[in-house]
Image: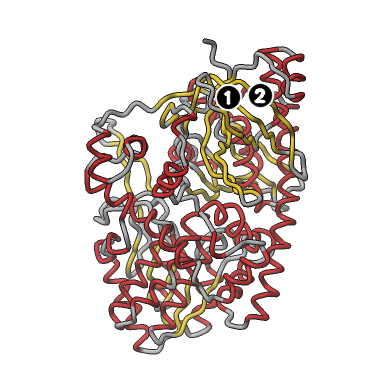
Amino acid sequence: MEKWMVSARKADFNRIARMCSVSPVLARIMVNRGLKEDEEFQKYLYGDLSCLHDPEDMKDMKTGVDCIVRSIKENQNICIASDFDVDGVFAGYILWRGILLCGGRAYVDVPDRIQEGYGLNERIVREAYAKGAGCILTCDNGIAAMEPVLMAKAMGLTVIVTDHHEPVYDIVHDDEGKESRHYRFPEADAVIDPKQPDCAYPFKGLCGAGVAYKFVQMLFEKFHIDEKELYKLLPFAAIATVADVMDLTDENRIIVKYGLHELAHTDHPGLLALIFHAGLNKNYISAYHVGFVIGPCFNAAGRLDTAQMAIRLLQTEDAGEAQCLASDLVELNQSRKEMTILGTKQAEELIESKGMDKDPVLVLCLEGCHESLAGIIAGRIKEKYYRPVIVGVETEQGIIKASGRSVEAYNMYEKLSECRDLFERFGGHAMAAGMSFKRENLQALKKRLNENCGLTEEDLKPVIHIDVPMPLGYITEEFIQELELLEPFGKGNPKPVFAEAHFQILRASVIGKNKNVLKMQIKNDSGVRMEALYFGDIPAFDACVEKNFGVESKKRMYAGLSNPVDMAFTYYPSVNEYGGRRSLQVTIQNFQRIPR
């Protein structure tokens, strides 16, 4: 069962509200997001592109850019070694476009997800050498590519790594048994990754495309390229930031905010075609649309086909070709959705049949599932069971390729590091990881992760953090408009959660083409009435009503008759516009009964 907790951070909300010209409620929400200093509040609400950090502060940035400047001036072909997900594809495009605008030559090479796996590899290096490339520039990968980098250097190639993943480290012990980390880095000409322990860059949360954007920013300064060209690349950095589920804090928030603004004015053929075929309006694209529509469409190429399809869509200047490629990507994503549903059902049946739902860490191997879907399925299973999940798929070579998704209380990367002897390859961060291991190591991995998980029962209960316990009567159109200052919403900057403890449900009905929306009229103890929508698990909602108030109360609720149902809701307010009329409404996020 969920734990509801009211955020109780202390601050002078009235002073903050006056300083920022907002309501005390907004001040409270900002404090709940971890902001403390006056400068942070101002930057959060009103920060613009001038607030972005200086790229030269990133370790090796100047060295890496100087290498590319030299390659461009010497007319060398540059191999951009990217990754097959949205972040890698968009990072690759940003670098490719930036180099071309500076007069350089470049091409983007992406590993095959199934045949080659993640990261820079021998094939990419050999082909770069064969094509006469003088330089390899990685993006969204490379921090762990020790052998491929050595190989490239031995062939006489310049290698610049740009990445955002955690550096590789070994656990070492001194003579007194004290534990520490010994980091290992590829022997490239420049290694640019803000997560390096000795990197002075003030923000560590950029995605691969964010690092690429910073690289191009400095490159444009060297070639005196108009700033407007840099801003045209913002939508690509913004889409990658959201799709790669980065925290929308600090400069990520600014990149996404202004990137979405630039997206509304883009003339990019590929983006326009994808937006059209996905059924979106480019003038009203939010972080939600990026995370759940645009991002998955671009990801589908690398999962089920080849990421080169997505690269071509971004690189083409032909509107007709863009329309064809975008249509194919949307269809591919639809296939991915259907396959994901089947794979998730298989995982749930396996967990229930084997009694694995009691394990604090779920480790399972699926049969007949497309290996590229393992991460999505792991995420779905994590949401249902709220515990760390690793989902693997066995290849014909007897190797299991797996993806993991974690919960807040469990650092997956650190726990997997303790089992590194079981893996052929692994990498990731606290909340997600990818790995491959031999079939015979599956049970050992499952045993060790569960025995050493350190998780308690409380850790495995999802926590709903309530920003403000707020009666319906506080909601106005002006307040809803003020909430827009908090956008964009996403990881690290979630949509605020409001709550009230006692509601009577005056009437209820299930609506929508798929009958998946519960529409209600609710009334609080002060007599304020409002329309409410619930998009979650309707059978679970009905079961809660039956359990607490009886079957007859549920029937009366749907019949629009008076009943003793008394529910607590968390919600988010909005304005409903229908038939030229505007009315206030709330979207219910969570529910439970709180006894009086």
* Gap between marks 1 and 2 measured at Cα: 7 Å
Q: Up-down: is 166 above or below 275?
A: above
The location of residue 93, given as percent across then percent down, is 49, 72
Tell me whether circle 1 and circle 2 mark residues in contact (CB < 8 Å).
yes
Residue at x 66% of width, y 20% of height: 544
> Residue lying furthest front in this view?
580
The residue nearer to you, when weighing 441 against 49, is 49
Q: Amino acid type of disc 2?
A: Leu
Residue at x 75% of width, y 25% of height: 558
The residue nearer to you, when weighing 104 against 402, is 104
| Residue 157 appears in view | yes
User: In the visual, does 360 lie left or right of 104?
Assistant: right
The location of residue 454, given as percent across then percent down, is 46, 25
Q: Which residue is mark 1?
A: 523
Quadrant of residue 273 within the rendered picture: bottom right
Q: Amino acid type of disc 1?
A: Lys
The location of residue 48, given as percent across then percent down, is 32, 60
Q: Which mark is residue 506?
A: 2
Q: Which mark is residue 358?
A: none
For label 1, the SS is strand
User: In the visual, does 36 lie left or right of 430?
Assistant: left
For label 2, the SS is strand
Q: Give whichever of discs 1 and 2 has the lower sequence position.
A: 2
Q: Up-down: is 3 above or below 411?
A: above
User: In the visual, does 51 lie left or right of 482?
Assistant: left
| Residue 141 appears in view | no
Q: Which quadrant would the N terminus be assigned to in this image?
A: top right
